[in-house]
């Protein structure tokens, strides 16, 4: 029973630790979702800006170049904006993938935790049953000990009575032998 109680206690500690890990992961997941929402809002503003101002402004900027170096500078600027937009879109997609993976991991861990808690509840029930059976057996053993002690006391009393009777009979036999001996002497 002690080993079972230690096992249950150890599992309870593990479950508490796992609950804390899940809570920490949920906080992290919440932060990631906020970051994804912020990126989505930023991308939405960027797309709205591009739609309202048109893609023509970039092309116009390229064609309004006054020299080759100005054109190259503006082309580099347009390329950096495009690269930035692609990076942000890729980052947004990665965050969504991480969120989905983390949600799936959390769901699996919560399911495993529920299974462990169910197993722990079963183990506690088994321990309670074992403890109940042990108490019942202790009661039976105590009753048997009490009954045996009563039988021993009764037997000891009967033995003492029999011994007293035997001593009395021996004394009577001795008296009769002495009386017979006296009678024989008188004869």
Image (spheres, helix red, strand yellow):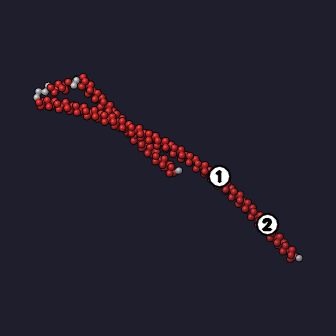
Q: State yes or no: discs 1 and 2 in contact (Cβ < 8 Å).
A: no
Task: Give the residue displayed 46% in from the left and 40% down from the top.
Answer: 114
Q: In which quarter of the image is the C terminus?
A: bottom right
For marks 1 and 2, the one nearer the N-term is 1
In the image, taking residue 59 as reference, residue 147 lies left or right, namely right
| Residue 64 point in image, percent of width and height | 14, 25
Inspect this view and state whether residue 111 appears: yes
Q: Distance between the residues labelled 1 and 2?
A: 38 Å
| Element type where label 2 sits in the image | helix
Please tell me whether residue 159 is drawn above or below residue 61 in the rendered image.
below
Task: Give the residue displayed 58% in from the left and 50% down from the top.
Answer: 134
Task: Give the residue displayed 28% in from the left and 34% down from the top.
Answer: 90
In the image, taking residue 154 as reference, residue 23 lies left or right, namely left
Q: Which of marks 1 and 2 is in front?
A: 1
Q: Residue furthest left?
A: 67
| Residue 45 point in image, percent of width and height | 27, 27
Inspect this view and state whether residue 27 appears: no
In the image, taking residue 60 as reference, residue 4 lies left or right, namely right
| Element type where label 1 sits in the image | helix
Reading the image, the residue beneath label 1 is 143
| Residue 143 point in image, percent of width and height | 65, 52
Please tell me whether residue 116 is drawn above or below residue 91 in the rendered image.
below
Determine which quarter of the picture holds residue 157: bottom right
Q: Check residue 169 in the rendering and tell me which mark sits there, or answer none.
A: 2
Determine which quarter of the picture holds residue 154: bottom right
Please tell me whether residue 44 is drawn above or below residue 155 in the rendered image.
above
| Residue 168 point in image, percent of width and height | 78, 66
Q: How crowded is mark 2: few (under 14 residues within 10 Å), some or many (20 or more)?
A: few
């Amino acid at each position: 029973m002690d080993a079972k109680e230690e096992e249950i206690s150890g599992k309870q500690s593990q479950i508490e630790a796992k609950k804390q890990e899940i809570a920490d992961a949920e906080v992290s997941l919440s932060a990631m979702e906020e970051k994804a929402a912020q990126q989505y809002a930023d991308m939405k503003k960027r797309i709205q800006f591009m739609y309202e101002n048109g893609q023509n402004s970039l092309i116009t900027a390229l064609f309004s170049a006054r020299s080759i170096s100005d054109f190259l500078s503006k082309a580099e600027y347009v390329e950096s904006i495009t690269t930035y937009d692609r990076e942000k879109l890729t980052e947004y997609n990665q965050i969504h993938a991480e969120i989905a993976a983390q949600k799936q991991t959390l769901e699996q861990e919560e399911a495993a935790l529920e299974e462990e808690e169910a197993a722990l509840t079963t183990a506690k029930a088994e321990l309670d049953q074992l403890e109940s059976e042990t108490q019942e057996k202790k009661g039976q053993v105590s009753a048997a000990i009490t009954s045996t002690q009563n039988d021993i006391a009764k037997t000891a009393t009967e033995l003492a009575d029999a011994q007293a009777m035997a001593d009395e009979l021996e004394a009577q036999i001795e008296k009769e032998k002495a009386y017979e001996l006296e009678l024989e002497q008188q004869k």
